[in-house]
Amino acid sequence: MKNTIARLAAALLALTLTTGFAAAQSKVTIAVGGGSCLCYLPTVLAKQLGEYDKAGLDVELVDLKGGSDALKAVLGGSADVVSGYFDHCVNLAAKKQELQAFVVYDRYPGLVLVVAPSRTNDIKSVKDLAGKKVGVSAPGSSTDFFLKYMLKKNGIDPTSAAVIGVGLGATAVAAMEQGQIDAAVMLDPSVTVLQGSHKDLRILSDTRTQKDTLETFGGEYPGGALYSTAAWVAKHEKETQALTNAILATLAWIHSHSPEEIMAKMPEETVGKNKDLYLAALKNTIPMFSETGKMDPKGADAVLAVFSVGSPEVANAKIDVSKTFTNRYVEQARKTTGNAK
């Protein structure tokens, strides 16, 4: 009788623990604007390291071809959070849609405007892109915004180039090598992959470093972040804090490990067959990743300034950029976990 009671008690305890664990795991779906791109590595690596689980979350990553598609997934209700570029939060504010970034993982955007190998001799400046076919991850994505900004900055009508969605990974590289497009806005590892095959690859603009970012935008310009609708963030403070904690822990891990160790944790399908090129691209990218997760208000102002140049709608919207982000969750994490600086 005692053995039977003991077994029942053990079974009940196991059930209670299992149920409690399940209850603690909140389900969150993150739409990623191109999981193969190194700019989004912290979101993917957090999953690989188990940081979401440690934070009490059951996270599903949905890989989409561009930031605009990831944004549509959240606005349409099929995902909770976007892992994408912060500039969408500013752009949508002009349309009276309230989006809020709550942890930033890219200090720089890492966007690179590259000429297709077959067009190196006849496209020598941004001005030469007028009337040309230029690839972006997806129309309406940050790559598209960047192209229009660069055209405008160089005195060219932002609509003068034909925009073609080619994704961010192997599809973009293939489109460039096969001559389907004349140029493209790309990100690593795709840029490094192309450079590996074409040593004379012409780069018209590069924002992978602080120096290049300052030259291009005139100031700091944040890239990738986790964001959602302001309503979702307000209703899911626990999940928002947990996501922030997971990303901050991942950023701390990145900056305390070698590129080789980071690559070893990434999914094989993401690294691809040419590990040497992926590693080279990763080494170029690591300085992009934030050490604090915080949004620099000046960086947010720079995003608004850039969009105001290329978009009359944004310029005339009188946007309060401070509402498009919050550092509250990063600051709370600093108090409780010490992962933020």
Image (cartoon, rainbow, N blue to C red):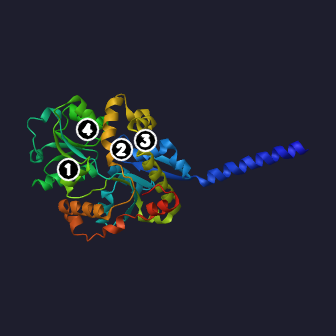
Q: Residue flagged by tag 3: what amino acid is it?
A: His
Q: CA distance from mark 1 to mark 4?
A: 16 Å
For disc 3, the marked residue is 257
Mark 3 or mark 1, which is nearer to you?
3
In the rendered structure, which disc, 2 or 1, sits on the residue that comes first in sequence? 2
Image quadrant containing the C terminus: bottom left
Image quadrant containing the N terminus: top right
Q: How many marks?
A: 4
In the rendered structure, which disc, 4 or 2, sits on the residue that comes first in sequence? 2
For disc 2, the marked residue is 34
Q: CA distance from mark 2 to mark 1?
A: 18 Å
In the rendered structure, which disc, 3 or 1, sits on the residue that comes first in sequence? 1
* Residue 38: % across, % down: 35, 42
In front of the other: 201 or 318: 201
Q: Is residue 168 something one can see in this rendering? A: no
Q: Residue flagged by tag 4: what amino acid is it?
A: Val
Q: Secondary structure at mark 1?
A: helix
Q: Residue flagged by tag 1: what amino acid is it?
A: Leu
For disc 1, the marked residue is 147
Q: Residues within 10 Å of mark 4 (few under 14, many from 20)?
A: many
In the rendered structure, which disc, 2 or 3, sits on the residue that comes first in sequence? 2
Mark 4 or mark 3, which is nearer to you?
3
Specify whether 21 is left or right of 10.
left
